[in-house]
Image: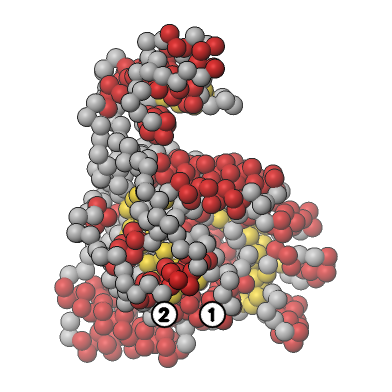
Amino acid sequence: MESLESLLAIIEKYWGYKSLRPLQREAMEASLAGRDSLAVLPTGGGKSLCYQAPAVLSGRLTVVVSPLIALMKDQVDRLLSRGISAAFLNSTLDPADRRRVINGISRNEYRLIFVAPERFDEWFYHFLQNVDVRSFAIDEAHCISHWGHDFRADYRQLGELKRRFPQVSVHAFTATATPRVRDDIIAQLGLVEPAVLVGDFFRPNLTYRVLRRRGEFQDVIEAVRRRPGKAGIVYCIRRADVDDLTSLLVSAGVRAVGYHAGMGDIERTEAQDAFAARKIDVVVATVAFGMGIDRADIRYVIHAAMPKSLEHYQQETGRAGRDGQPAECILYYSGADYKLWESIIGGNDPVDAQEQLRLLSEMYRYCTTIGCRHRRLVSYFGQKWERDSCGACDVCLGEHETLSDSTITAQKIMSCVLRTGERYGAAHVIDVLLGEETEQVIERGHRDLSTFGLLADQTKPVLRAWIDQLIEQGCMRRDGEYRVLKVTPKGWRVLRSQEEAVLYDVSAQFARKRRTRRKSESSARSKRSSLPPLEKASSLLDRPRTTRKSQVPEPLDGRALALFDVLKNLRRELAEEFNVPAFMVFSDRTLREMARSRPHTREEMMKVPGVGPAKFEGYGERFLQVIRESGM
């Protein structure tokens, strides 16, 4: 077996890294040992290196299954720029190029070959059985699971890999998989005693905020305008919304571009390249955008409407702040978003639709329940939350108003749960608290309870939100198939006034708003020449957040910051000269370290994380020259 020391030398030579991120070492050790594995590493966790570096060291072929043509090309371009032999097989190749790649595989010319899942037909299986395949790496592996958020039928046939290649290791990678999905991935792929590696879903440098949307695009436009010149992604549900919002932002002087599946291939590629090259600050997109984007300085991700699952939300917000610097994730939602997704999902296969509606309900509950955002995400993906406060979301930063009588209100709700015998779900408990004389309330004799009508001045949505908050705080839990409410030991302490509960005032979220008539034609909307005036700068969106200092890279001092700007300008020039995205020259993190340490020799430069021999030969001297001449 190849040694880990040799692997680290390969990584430093071709990628310029001198250390590994959490779980990368374990994933590579599994690969070197020929052991199957499943790695769930959040967006930005460095999944691709886990299968690329072992392939380079082994000198044998790794077949990578990737779902997007654009992502394949991007991966291959990056590998080739590092001097690593790689190619892809997909529908964009003409017959001559396809023969060239096939012949190259036969001659063992490539360390990595990227293919789509639908490529695995009988001919391809037979072809691979006659070449020296060392391993299979399956990217976006959650697509194989019916319980995942992005099931694709073509992925199902990948279960054939272990049957046809029993001696070849299979490695599954994804950024989003709940425990149920992880188990299903292992079962569907037939992985044999796999190493299961799950990264930490807590991203302390990301500040999460969830706000009820006012109007159509007003909130988003104001949020973008408050962040001039910063890189951001704005996600919309519909293509028409992407077009309209992009037009409005451009009219406001924002360097923005749209991206969705209805655009031509060339137009989408140009948009993506412009963003990667920092010629554009904001991409307004549907979920079609983002996979494989390696721009580390994205300072915010805004959802103009609610995404359809927490998996999508976690993956999309994970594209912010990959350089470790503070970034914001702002979600604007309304009840209309749920209805829109419900209508879209309704046209799908009934089995798939049922699961997608379950995921949608989880997403809506995340929006309407006020509790620590990080805790909710971490818990959803099956990890324990052992912190009192994240210090990085609207709830933990105290941006929501609490009820002055939180504990008393909580006691009333839990008393009703107990008075009804802990045998009912939230809907029935709410009916009793509101004093609703429903058939079930009357039949069960609950009209005679002391808690009947105890909170009659509230509304159903508000009471449901408070019940969710109490569950989130551990005062109650849902039990069994019928999700019956039960009071926990912590809830009993609150009932006895031995501990306090915190409830947030959500009445404003559910207040009936005047409906504004939406213009029927998008052409009429695109002609708007003026934007709504900015409200006074009192928004909570810009409130400073607190983060433990050790978890976020220290800021640069004034001199280093000036040099950092000079180095970024040089990187942009080199990127244009070599016709590559700027991040393929050096990452922001590497430039920051250069600005901080100011290397003047090759030896000093080689100590900077992200600078390896290959990168130095290509760009190192130019950066050294600028640093020397700057005098900073």
Q: Which residue is mark 1?
A: 267
* Residue 556 sits above or below residue 107 on the image: above
Q: Where does residue 45 sit, x and y in percent of width and height?
A: 46, 59
Report x, y in % for residue 51: 57, 64
Q: Amino acid at mark 1?
A: Glu
10 Å crowding of disc 2: few (<14), some (14-19), many (20+):
many
Residue at 55%, 51% (x, y): give it.
341
Using the image as rendered, state which of residue 58 and residue 157 is in the foreground. 157
Find residue 499 and report its horizontal and vertical position in percent.
Answer: 27, 22
The image quadrant that residue 93 belongs to is bottom right
The x and y percentages for residue 344 are 60, 53
* Secondary structure under the numbered disc 1 in the rendered image: helix
Could you tell me if residue 326 is visible in this image? yes
Foreground: disc 2 or disc 1: 1
Which quarter of the figure is the C terminus placed in? bottom left
Residue at left offset 43%, top offset 69%: 525
Of residues 354 and 297, the one drawn nearer to the viewer in this rendering: 354
Instruction: Specify whether 150 is left or right of 388.
Output: right
Q: Quadrant of residue 595?
A: bottom left
Q: Name the residue type under label 2.
A: Ala
**Residue at image x 72%, y 59%?**
154
**Which residue, given by chain and number where applicable, does mark 2 sit on?**
277
247 and 266: which one is in front?
A: 247
